[in-house]
Amino acid sequence: MIKAFQSIVCAAVLLSGTPALAQQLDNPAAAFGRRTAVHSIALSPSGDHVVFVGAAAGRGSSAYVASVEGGEARVIASTTGDPGNLRWCRYSGIDRIVCAISALNESYMGDVLGVSRLVAMDEEGENALSLSQHRGGRFDGQIIDWLPGENNEVLISRWGRGGLRVVRADTVTGDSSQAERPNERAGGFITDGRGNVRIMLMRERRGATGMSANDINAFFREPGGIRWENLSTYNSEDRSGFYPSVIDPDLDVVYGFERVDGRHAVFRVQLNDTLDRELLYSHDSVDVGNLITIGRDRRVIGVGYAEDRPVVEYFDAEFVALANSLSGALSNVPMIRFVDINDDETRVLIWAGSDTDPGRYYVFDRNAMTLNHILDERPVLADVPLSPVRPIQYPASDGTMIPGYLTLPVGREGERLPTIVMPHGGPEARDVWGFDWMAQFFAYQGYAVLQPNFRGSAGYGSGWLAENGFRNWETAIRDINDGARWLISEGIADPDRLAGVGWSYGGYAVLQSATYEPNLFKAIVAIAPVTDLPALRREGLRYRDGRNFSEYLGNGPHIEAGSPARNADRIVAPVLLFHGDLDVNVNIEQSRRMQDRLEDAGRESELIIFEGLEHSLVDSEIRAQMLEHTDRFLRTAFARSN
């Protein structure tokens, strides 16, 4: 079967035509800043159609339905992004679709609040129906079970009077019934994919304050049972204990995560009074990042993690064979993901991409043994020569080897290039090998780009994460700056044309780098950055998790010393700031405060505010403006430093 499949796939690829000539872009900022044509996609239960959500003009989005056999996709719903936008769509039945819409609004008290709605409609976009059961609530709830065996019904967990509950909702009529009574202490429920609520998560509270504590207790019940039994306790501060994720009803186990030797590993636990545990997968150097699930019942088929490159280990023998065959047939796109599968598992939705390929979608028909290319994630870049991304390591000042990724302009090696050091956000995140629209834009414009996974990054275990990138900011910033010095020593970077560019925590990091070693970077660009840690703590204390966040930041002299806005007079490089005024992740006052302090210190700086936009600046035109403005700013700053 595998040989036959591989030959058919190869033939399909070869018959698709000779490669197009390399395309040169008239407006690189617009091309790379354009949001993805597909950011959510799912197969219909029959496997005949896909529904996907992609970018529309500006900050808008549209939902489309398309045949997997080809033909033009039809729009079934659209939003303008002012204020709402489509997030995802998925089939709830043979020809019925549910979409999630989210929006950000400024409240009468000045806070920016998120709002979400669930809307059902036919494949043609007709007979739209809100699944909301109450008016005035911020959230319609979360679909926790798609009930694949019961056409057009779903289970939704929803906040209301008495706490969190679960309702069974008909996506055609809107009728609903209670599936799990409200519980004021519940923070989440997990079903078995067959309509049975089997696990309840409870976040403990801090006495009379009502604020969240660090412990998350999980309870389970046996099939058909009523009584909740203790399953596990997970501590969100030190990340100890077992955190449940997905249930397999056939094995009657729950898959979840727990640390082994300081790194996240996957266990499965029997859901009966034995609570028998099995270590399913662990890695000796990196965290297991996620469970790989497929289908409307979220069947677990493997685990994913990232070493130098992303890796998937499949448990299911059929998917092992399919992945191996696809890797041989689509060798130019080495990253392959199984995105979805139809209800009878005859058709599989596949994504394939690489560092130089933003990604494309295929549908594999197991009966006909055919592979149809249906969509490109970024069509405008399909024939554009992109830059290979090279996994690297460089020595920190204490001798520790820091992993990261280096992107060079096409055809250029180390030759004293204009260079950008671009630390990731988070801080508890990490960069991975693959396509990155900002790094690729800068490389296309002739810059070298380093993306360091400094200490404080996630993915490498508790030792590497340390306390976090705020408490241990000195270590994180030294690692980032050591990366810049390594680029100079290797002859890659021109020291007079070296900049720091970052988003969110990355923006914080490059600003803090400029206070820590003022003469290293010749220009700083910070997008939606944290700039003042004491102010960040005060903002956080308004929310239920505020006490946890305050403890996360810690107390001591590192708070004042680690705030770029409070040390703005040490910065000598010109600074460019971008921020959306509806940012719920990092309040815009953080950038305003930074700009004020830089002006007070007589430093060269500019703050550009994007009205009506959130943390990710989900607007293709705004992203293009930001890229173009950044490129122009860097070239001007570099010209002055020479």
Image: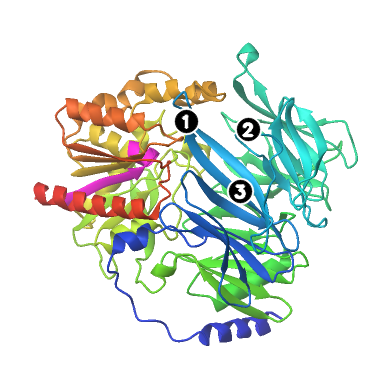
Q: 225 or 242: which is nearer to us?
A: 225
Residue at screen point 74% across, 25% down = 162
Q: Secondary structure at mark 2?
A: loop
Q: Nearer the viewer, mark 1 or mark 3?
A: 3
Q: Is residue 505 magenta?
A: yes
Residue 24: x %, y % from top left: 29, 73
Specify which label sits upstream in the sequence, 2 or 1.
2
Q: Which mark is residue 100?
A: 3
Whether residue 415 is visible to the viewer of this picture, yes or no, is yes
**Numbered circle sitting on residue 467:** 1
Q: Residues within 10 Å of mark 1 (few under 14, many from 20)?
A: some
Frontmost residue, 134 versus 511: 134
Q: Residue furthest right?
A: 224
Magenta span: predominant SS is strand
Given residues 209 and 108, the one toward you in this image is 108
Q: Residue at image x 68%, y 67%?
A: 319
Q: On screen, 44 above or below 397?
A: below
Which residue position holds label 2?
137
Q: Name which residue type carries label 1.
A: Glu
| Image-based side of 183 in relation to 309, left or right | right
Lower position in the chain sequence, tag 3 or tag 2: 3
- Look at 55% across and 25% down and name the residue there: 545
Disc 3 and disc 2 in contact, CB within 8 angstroms:
no
Q: Position of residue 403 (x, y in %)?
A: 40, 50
Would you say 153 lies left or right of 467 here? right
Locate residue 408: give its quadrant: bottom left
Magenta segment, which residues? Answer: 495-508
Q: Select label 3 or label 2 by which is in front.
A: 2
Q: Is residue 284 left or right of residue 634?
A: right
| Nearer-N-terminus badge (1/3) | 3
Along the viewing direction, whichever of 145 and 485 lies nearer the viewer: 145
